[in-house]
Amino acid sequence: MNVAGKHYRTIWLKDGAPEVVQIIDQRLLPHEFHIVDLQTVDEVAYAIKEMQVRGAGLIGATAGYGMYIAALQAPKDSQEAFLSFIEEAGEQLKATRPTAVNLEWAVERQKIAIAEAVSIDDMIAIAQQTAQDIADEDAEFCRRIGDHGVSLIENFAARKNGEPVNILTHCNAGWLAFVDYGSATAPIYAAHDKGINVHVWVDETRPRNQGARLTAWELGQHGVPHAVIADNVGGHLMQHGLVDLVIVGTDRTTYTGDVANKIGTYLKALAAYDNDVPFYVALPSSSFDWKIRDGLRQIPIEQRNGDEVRHIYGRRENGDTDWVLLTPQDSPTANYAFDVTPARLVTDLITERGICDASETDIARLFPDKILAGDNVPR
Ligand code: MRU
């Protein structure tokens, strides 16, 4: 994806220094574009936990590179010591954020790959290759989501006689949440690039404002018409026919089609259902949980520090960026980071293998191999 005309991914190995992983510090966007070096497992864990990187796909890719860094950092005197370091690094990374299933998926994929090598040197080489494969696959799967999803937008465009197709999205399931393209945004970028007139309603997405800060910024970099709206506006727009479709991402979707996504998604799905607005969820297969049947009861929902609700981050007129206090200093807060939208409110899922109903049978039609494996491990 382009930033000021230059192509970036969200994570990569430093040119000429393949032991260094580089990321964009997303906490500072859109006001500052700052690249950070990661060289230890602690730094990778911090980057995920404190949301320098975020979004399901990118969390998974970062964990993949984190396991490569663990292989570089691990003691080399015995295989036992090396593998025990790898195991501990995996547990440390998995503990950083609980909801996005891509994190566990990437760590387990690395552990399986590393265990197949015979020497420590091979294990390091395999960890590097696997991290690269996870990142490349993430970008490619998102590109394919764009290819499949664009047909949905084309159908709306055909009925609108050149008027814009209005798409509402929540949070940031854009290229910043993945390695490239994004999930929810991939069909939007594909449609825009084909010359279809699209317009995106961007939910601000309190408390961390991923919509207002990140989705608005990346759509702007790509030249896609959009408007940022306060979190509670979507229902009103739908009642007045101003939303043709909703496309959101997901941090974890059960094999039965229940969708965990950024807090507030469920309310948008209810409003969409009440107004006959199609509600699509775009995801690569790494965001399915092949073990969990009941999203509401089984998906772990992250609760974050209440300071995120108490404060808001932005830029002053003099150019300085800062957090400011929004609530009374001592007001108690609750900060649930995700909610679950039941499958019955989801019109369809857009995946790298095509579009399917949010149902066990139709997901199994597209992913028979994964359903059979049933264990979140890539086959
Ligand atoms: O807390 P975040 O920013 O890591 O949350 C993830 C998200 O950006 C959203 O929930 C997104 O819609 C799905 S992740 C592709």
Image (cartoon, grey):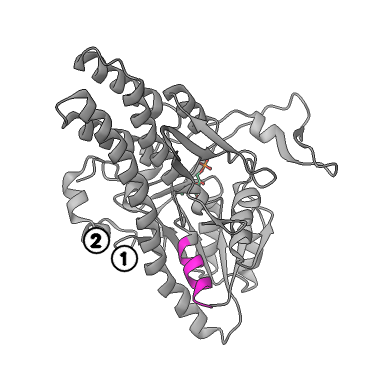
**Is 77 placed above or below 220 here?**
above
Q: Which residues are magenta?
A: 186-195
- Mark number displayed over residue 354: 1
Q: Residue at x 30, y 45 (%)?
A: 133
Q: Circle 2 sits on which residue?
A: 366
Q: Residue at x 42, y 58 (%)?
A: 282
- Residue type, numbered disc 1: Gly
Nearer the N terminus, badge 1 or badge 2? 1
Q: Secondary structure at mark 2?
A: helix
Q: Is residue 349 visible?
A: no
- The reply to whether discs 1 and 2 touch (Cβ–Cβ < 8 Å) is yes
Q: Is residue 187 magenta?
A: yes
247 on left or right of 135:
right
Mark 1 burial class by Cα count in 10 Å: few <14, some 14-19, many 20+: some
- Residue type, numbered disc 2: Leu
150 on left or right of 355:
right
Q: What x and y, as percent, mark residue 3?
A: 59, 54
- Mark number displayed over residue 198: none
User: For the stretch drawn in magenta, what is the main secondary structure?
Assistant: helix
Label 2 CB sits under 8 Å from any ligand 1 atom: no
**Is 107 placed above or below 32 here?**
above
Q: Residue at x 39, y 23 (%)?
A: 92
**Is 302 placed above or below 135 here?**
above
Q: Nearer the viewer, residue 197 or 9?
A: 9
Mark 2 burial class by Cα count in 10 Å: few <14, some 14-19, many 20+: some
Label 1 CB sits under 8 Å from any ligand 1 atom: no
Residue 322 found in image quarter: top right
**Is 104 placed above or below 155 here?**
above
Q: Is residue 308 magenta?
A: no
